[in-house]
Amino acid sequence: MISRLFLILLPIFGISHAMASELTQYLQEEAQAFVLGQLDVPLDAQAEVQAASIDERLPLSRCEGALTISLPARMEIRRNTTVYLKCEEEKPWDLYLPVRVSIQKPYVTVAAPVAKGDILSESMLTLAYQDQTLIRGDFLSDPAPLIGVRSKRELKPGQPIRLTQVCVVCKGDQVTLSAENSSMQIKTMARALQDGSFGDMIRLVNIRSGKPVQGKVEAVGSVVVTF
């Protein structure tokens, strides 16, 4: 008799649990959509919003058409936010729901491991995203300037390529040396006497004259002297 009753109740319980799970997921998604609508996300970034789980035993309803979502008084959207859900149906309910917010910033990394001394090509580079509070330092969000640079150490997928890990101009490289001011520009060839990254001042020797010179690394194979 007990086993027969169990078999009768089992599908009923399963349906009830499924409905409760669908309801809580719906309310989570509504809360997430509300928070996303409040965010001012930079064009190059992505937002990840995740509402906390809701106890499926709570006497809640979908409350479509009568559900309001708001921020508690004087609260702002931040990394850990709480939103207030209120249902004004015949059987009203309300709920404070924690929501975690993460703004993901892009950074350039490698698609596969790169050995020390390898020259980076376009196919070796890819974009990844990480919480903006966790990614700092000398990284780039555009792969283009890194095409043609040489790795100074092993590079691993998923880790930002730091400018200290590559040389844009490497010692011994033959580069275009541009001497320029507001009215003229003269180009010649020079050989780098030291490694340099974007914006670094490095020592070079003019191949034609043999004279030493200092210039600022502008791009792969390009150094500028201002006079």
Image (cartoon, rainbow, N blue to C red):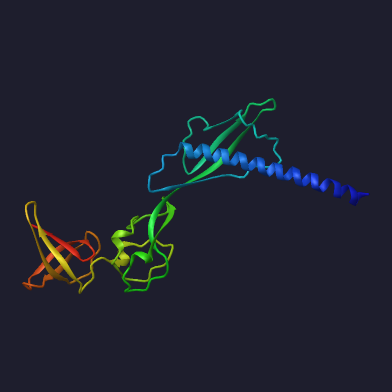
Residue 73 shown left or right of residue 177 in the figure: right
Q: Position of residue 180 (x, y in %)?
A: 10, 57
Residue drawn at x 8%, y 54% as measured from the top left: 181
> Residue 132 versus residue 89: which sits nearer the camera?
89
Does 9 appear above or below 209? above
Residue 59 shown left or right of residue 150 in the figure: right
Q: Where is residue 186 in the image (x, y as percent from the top left)?
A: 8, 61
Which residue ends up furthest to the front in the rendered image?
A: 123
Residue drawn at x 33%, y 59% as measured from the top left: 143
Q: In which quarter of the image is the C terminus?
A: bottom left
Locate residue 117: give its quadrant.
bottom left
Q: Position of residue 132 (x, y in %)?
A: 41, 50
> Residue 106 versus residue 59: which sits nearer the camera?
106
User: Tag count in the figure?
Assistant: 0
Residue 206 shown left or right of residue 20 in the figure: left
Locate residue 97: give its quadrant.
top right
Does 104 appear above or below 156? above
Residue drawn at x 41%, y 67% as measured from the top left: 156
Locate residue 56: give its quadrant.
top right
Q: Position of residue 45 (x, y in %)?
A: 40, 48
Residue drawn at x 48%, y 44% as measured from the top left: 79
Does 20 appear above or below 143? above
